[in-house]
Image (tube, helix red, strand yellow):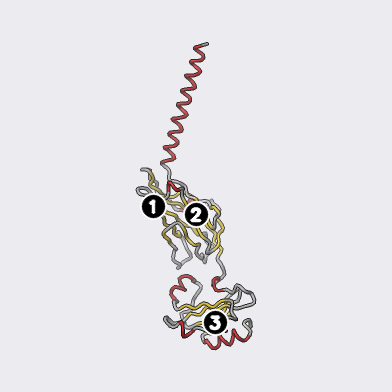
Amino acid sequence: MMKRKLLFYGTTAILLLIVLIAMDRYKLYKEEKPPVPSITVNGQEIPSIVGQYDWHGTKTKKIEPIKAMAGMNPTKVKEKQTLEVSFPPELEPASMTISQVNSAPGLEKKTVQGNRMQIPKSLTQERIYFKIKAQWKKDYSTYYVKTDIEDLPPFYDFLSKDPGKLSVLAIVPRGESEKYDIPDEVKEKLDSFHISDDMESLKKQYPELLTNVTPVYMIFNSEFHQQTLQDKDQLIERVMDDGRD
């Protein structure tokens, strides 16, 4: 009877030791893998894959994200939503970069330093991929997400929010905003009035802006760009007439 008890306790001790060793090895294995961040768009978590990394001495080769994610469904997102990356506090990287992997022909690929990026306009039917690179003191890791971006209507920011009123974007020669501004009583008839003397910045933000002429007054309703005028008096007459015709 005593021998059976000793055999039982001995076997249990060996099994427990094996389990502890296995758990310890699994812990070491996990420590060889970089942490997986939470990646969200407007607060909703989206799937990602791990790319190339150098983590605790373990290095992997560079991957082609478009090939690696070929069988993965894209996450539907909207232009101007916010993509955000976060890690557990104890594994917070020293720096992060989010960058566009691909874009429509001729358009710049957007890159930002930090853990947030506003989803850009895609202007293409292709899926848009984003790369996140996290850098720690000695290690780094990359991550990729695949998105299907819904572009907002052209000049979305300038569309009237009130279906019963118009809005206007005035693009004027540099340093001459005061000269091309319109009276307050005209502005009161509008939903909004925007004026800018920085054509270059506007074109970077709104690729759909094709004109190089200034001054121009672009008139919008709540759905689309309706009309463009070059004469301030014509604009005032148009707005004061009834604001809709």
Q: Residue at x 55, y 88 (%)?
A: 234
Residue 207 in the image, given as x and y percentages of width and height: 49, 71
Q: Tell me the crowding category of disc 3: few under 14, some 14 to 19, or many 20 or more residues within 10 angstroms, Cα based.
A: some
Q: Nearer the viewer, mark 1 or mark 3?
A: 1
Residue type at numbered disc 1: Ala
Q: Pinpoint residue 55: horizontal percent, then vertical percent.
A: 39, 45
Instruction: Give the spatial CA distance, label 1 vs label 2.
Output: 21 Å
User: Mark 2 belongs to which amino acid?
Assistant: Val
Assign a secondary structure to mark 1: loop
Cβ atoms under marks 1 and 2 closer than 8 Å: no
Q: Are marks 1 and 3 in contact (CB under 8 Å)?
A: no
199 lies above or below 52 = below
Residue 84, horizontal then vertical, whole percent: 49, 56
Q: Quadrant of the C terminus?
A: bottom right
The residue that disc 1 covers is 94
Instruction: Check residue 228 in the rendering and tell me which mark sits there, or answer none.
Output: 3
Residue at figure coordinates x 62%, y 74% from the top left = 162
Give whichever of discs 3 and 2 has the lower sequence position: 2
Residue at 58 percent across and 88 percent down: it is 237
Q: Nearer the viewer, residue 175 or 63?
A: 175
- Find numbered disc 3 in the image and state the secondary structure of the residue it sits on: strand
Given residues 29 and 114, the one toward you in this image is 114
Which mark is drawn over residue 145? 2
- Label annotation for residue 161: none
Q: Amino acid at mark 3?
A: Thr
Q: Residue furthest top?
A: 1
Q: Earlier in the sequence, mark 1 or mark 3?
A: 1
Label 2 secondary element: strand
Mark 3–mark 2 contact, CB under 8 Å?
no
71 above or below 107?
A: above
